Image (cartoon, grey):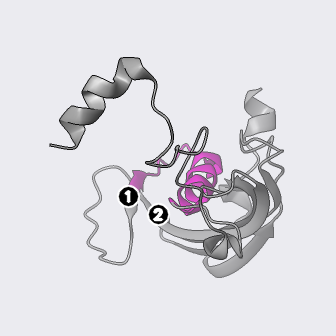
Amino acid sequence: MGAERSMVRIELAALREGFQRLELTPSAEALDLDPQVFEDIRVELQLTYEDGRLLVQLWAGATATLECDRTLELFKQSIEGAYSLFYAPPGATVRRDDVEEFRELRASDRFVDLTDVVRDTLLLAIPMRKVKPGAESIPIPTQFGAPAAPEDAPVDPRWEALRKLRNL
């Protein structure tokens, strides 16, 4: 499963010095995501490679099939997220405020694997509150079970003592 799962890899030998862009369309299975939830996955990478250091700025988007919190109906919604990483040799001093994560990049490394980062970015892009468009206007039932009997309806005599207590 390791080779199949590592779908978002950057071969370091293929990188040239400076800035470059990559666009990828990995499958949900390659990212270890549920293919019934995630489809049309797109990943855009902006890479800056200089002096054995690599700045990765990524954007990931997909169409997600979500369950509405109000209606429990399935609906599709576009989701997207961004993340940035900086790879530097071990022991290098790095001061960057525009980067969310730092990782080591050894001279012996042949590639960087961004599979987990892309998967986590997409999972974190799912909204906490999932509401299908138009579901906000649908009334939510607040009474369940049989309708309440009117006050003047005959009461089972076994409950009459409790009814008198309630009316005190």
Q: Residue at x 36, y 23 (%)?
A: 159
| Mark 2: amino acid | Leu
Q: Residue furthest bottom?
A: 19
Looking at the rendered image, the quarter that the C terminus falls into is: top left
| Residue found 63% across the figure and 50% down from its top | 119
Query: Which residue lies most toward the left here?
Result: 168
Q: Is residue 107 left or right of residue 146?
A: left
From the top left corner, tell me how far across and down residue 120 is, in percent: 56, 51
Q: Amino acid at mark 1?
A: Phe
Q: Secondary structure at mark 1?
A: strand
Is the C-beta separation of discs 2 and 1 under 8 Å? yes
At 52% across and 44% down in the image, what residue appears?
A: 148
Spot occupied by residue 63 in the image (x, y as percentages of width and height): 78, 64
Q: Which residue is mark 1?
A: 102
Q: Mark 2, residues whose alpha carbon is within 10 Å: few (<14), some, or many (≥20)?
A: some
Residue closest to the eye, 16 or 129 = 129
The mark that comes first in sequence, 2 or 1, is: 2
Numbered label tally: 2
Give the residue pinned by disc 2: 85
